[in-house]
Amino acid sequence: MITNTAIKWCPEFTIGHNKIDKQHEYLFQLLANIQHQVHKPNHQDLIKQSLRDLFDYTQRHFKDEEQLMREVGYPDLTIHSIQHDNLLNQVEDMIDNLNDSNPIAIDKLILFLVDWLTEHILGEDLVLARYLNKTNLNITTTG
């Protein structure tokens, strides 16, 4: 089960944009918190609320990331945005259909989210970082 594997941010997830990097790191923290909640008694309501909080924060992060892409004229904005929308739709369905009494389903959802976030950062978001570097745009913006 995923609950035996620690979820944590790794430096290789850094894309070089402070605001986006901080948001990515916070997403990992939210997932780690949910992972720890699985072990607590009467955790079902807490986990569902935490998943909703994660979903809401993810929406905000995607809006920020897409706004950055618009500002710099990123050519793959549409594709990147579709990936974001697909994830949000998929996760919303998973949360809505989550059976509170099934910790394995919660584990699968957490694992899915960690895998997606990791692959997305190391794939699509690093492509964005290379674009920002190539075009000499300042990507170390704070925020």
Image (cartoon, rainbow, N blue to C red):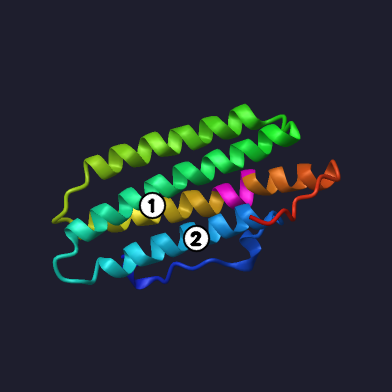
Q: Position of residue 93 (x, y in %)?
A: 29, 37
Question: Within the magenta stretch, is there residue 123?
Answer: yes
Q: Label 1's element?
A: helix
Q: Residue 69 occupies which quadrant of the picture?
A: top right
Query: Dot 2 corresponds to which residue?
Result: 26
- Residue 90 lies, with reference to residue 136, above or below; the image says above
Residue type, label 2: Tyr
Quadrant for the C terminus in the image: bottom right
Residue 46 appearing in the image: yes
Rendering quarter of residue 35: bottom left
Q: Which residue is mark 1?
A: 54
Q: Amino acid at mark 1?
A: Leu
User: Does residue 130 lie above or below 11 as drawn?
Assistant: above
Name the magenta segment's main secondary structure: helix
Q: Is residue 2 among the parts visible in the rendering?
A: no
In the rendered structure, which disc, 2 or 1, sits on the residue that comes first in sequence?
A: 2
Q: Residues within 10 Å of mark 2 (few under 14, many from 20)?
A: some
Q: Which residues are magenta?
A: 120-124
**Residue 56, percent across and down?**
39, 45
Q: Residue furthest top?
A: 78
Does the magenta run of residues contain 25? Answer: no
